[in-house]
Image: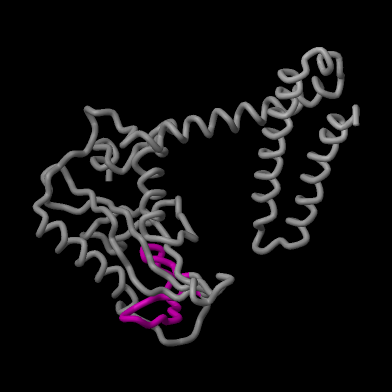
Amino acid sequence: MKNIDTKILVAIPLLAFFLCIFFIATDQGGSAFGNIIDTLRITSVILFIYCLLLLIVSYKKNIKKVEVWFVILISSPFALILISSKINNLKLELTETTTPQEFEYNLYIDQIKYLNDKKIIENEIDSLIEIKTVHKPSKLALRYFNGKTYHDTIERDWSINLPLDIEYRKTVIDTLFYSVDGEQIKAGLLINKVVNKYRSKPEDSIDFIGNAFIYNSNSRKPFKILRYRFLGFDTYEACSDRLRFWYLKKLGTDENEYNLNDKRFLSKI
């Protein structure tokens, strides 16, 4: 039993190794790489914390163990980065926005106008397929209109591409952002309610997909979808929270990036 600590130190990375092999063997669409990275990060944190506990609980017994200090040395960079990231994300969760107060968007829009504008944009997204539809079957782009999906041979990067294996049910505009005078819609957050056939339970097949977009009503390509998309949420609220976390908080912490509620971002559109 006296070597139980060492055995656990060996068992933890060994278990992580077999998990990585499992992810590679069951890979679908390149998901294995992300799962392996997450496994290595979590394993590093577990090993780091476990070795610290060994030193705290039984300092005299473990202080001279080379394997304990070796594991701490190897795992500490990954563990400290992940722990720091988790702490920063928790701070962001508790923050309404990271946009500096002097640049924060706080324009008042009449509630009736706002609701009408949301409905107009939702209808415009749903009706994109109606424009110059080509009924020749193609896998180039799948479009949605009036409750039906169509194969469209026109490549429209300004519309919402629909994955072939997902059935779209509803388009909802979560949030709209306007120009400083409140007259023009400049950007927004979009959530699609979909049916995901890959769900394990058919009765629980609803997913929510979140996107952010820039809008220009005078352009031939009025919608520009921003690069961060969020998939696989069970509820509308969860999807909305993730969109807001990223586009009103996280994005603004990156160098040369602005949140969607930042006047500097809205003014350059």
Residue 240 is situated, as x and y percent measured from the top left of the image, at 36, 53
Residue 87 is situated, as x and y percent measured from the top left of the image, at 50, 30
Verify whether residue 161 appears in magenta: yes
205 or 110, which lies in front?
205
Q: Quadrant of the N terminus?
A: top right
Question: Which stretch is magenta?
Answer: 140-162
266 or 11, which lies in front?
11
* Residue drawn at 77 percent across, 45 percent down: 16
* Residue drawn at 30 percent across, 79 percent down: 130
| Drawn side of residue 104 relative to residue 153, left or right | left
How is this picture coloured?
one colour
In the rendered image of this protein, does residue 106 appear above or below residue 201? above
Residue 68 is situated, as x and y percent measured from the top left of the image, at 81, 23
In the rendered image of this protein, does residue 22 appear above or below residue 205? above
* Residue drawn at 70 percent across, 48 percent down: 36
* Residue drawn at 73 percent across, 62 percent down: 26
Question: Residue extending furthest front?
Answer: 1
Residue 97 is situated, as x and y percent measured from the top left of the image, at 32, 36
In the rendered image of this protein, does residue 259 appear above or below residue 35? above
Verify whether residue 218 appears in magenta: no
57 or 196, which lies in front?
57
177 or 81, which lies in front?
81
